[in-house]
Image: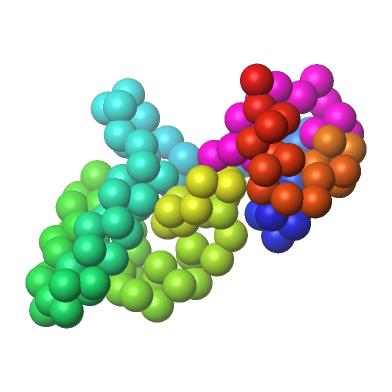
Amino acid sequence: MNETLASMVSKEIGSIIYEKYYPWYENGYNQNQGVGSGFDFNQEMREIRRAVDKYLAQGDIEQAEEFMEQKRQYLASIGYYIRKLNQAYFAFHGTYADSPTSVSPIGVELKKLREQSASLKDFLDTVAAMTSRQNLRDSLK
């Protein structure tokens, strides 16, 4: 939970600074890709991760690799360029629960709590007092 919180807060603070001091640049990479199409990159990556995990649990490594390559090509066709989509990608990009490839519910729960919080400080104060995931679940309205 701590690492996910740090990741979320650093992104939020980074966005605030970026917008304040560099408004003439686009904020983030591939931000405008897929806009208007209803495409959700984070959701797509979670679904890919779940499918790949299922193939691997069944011992079907070749099918998992073929599936990842098909999805990599699909993502590239709509403007999301990933050089190599494989287990190493998921391991590197899925470390914290707020990352697109994470299948942990903690990231979603922390995002909901952030939306409920009046300020970043209130959010941090609330999470700082937590000692378990149950505390996080209990804090959600």
Spot occupied by residue 118 in the image (x, y as percentages of width and height): 80, 20
Percent of width and height locating residue 73: 18, 59
**Closest to the observer, 125 or 86:** 125
Q: Is residue 37 left or right of residue 88?
A: left
- What's the image's color scheme? rainbow
**Which part of the image, by quadrant, shows the N terminus?**
bottom right
- Name the residue: 84% across, 36% down: 126
Asked if 71 appears above or below 40 in the picture, the reply is below
Displayed quadrant of residue 20: top right
Of 84 and 64, which appears nearest the observer? 64
Locate residue 36, reporting x and y percent.
32, 24
> Where does the image place residue 89, in percent across and percent down from the top left?
40, 71
Q: Is residue 93 visible?
A: yes
Q: Is 24 on the left-hand or right-hand side of 76?
A: right
Instruction: Tell me: residue 68, above or below residue 110.
Output: below
Residue 116: image quadrant is top right
Verify whether residue 119 appears in magenta. yes
Which quadrant holds the C terminus?
top right
Q: Is residue 102 left or right of residue 113?
A: left
- Name the residue located 30 percent from the left edge and 34 percent from the top edge: 39
Front position in the image: 116 or 100: 116
The one of 124 and 59 positioned closer to us in this rendering: 59
Q: Which residue is drawn at the image coordinates 70% and 60% (left, top)?
A: 3
Our reading of the magenta stretch's main secondary structure is helix
User: What segment carries the magenta color?
Assistant: 108-123
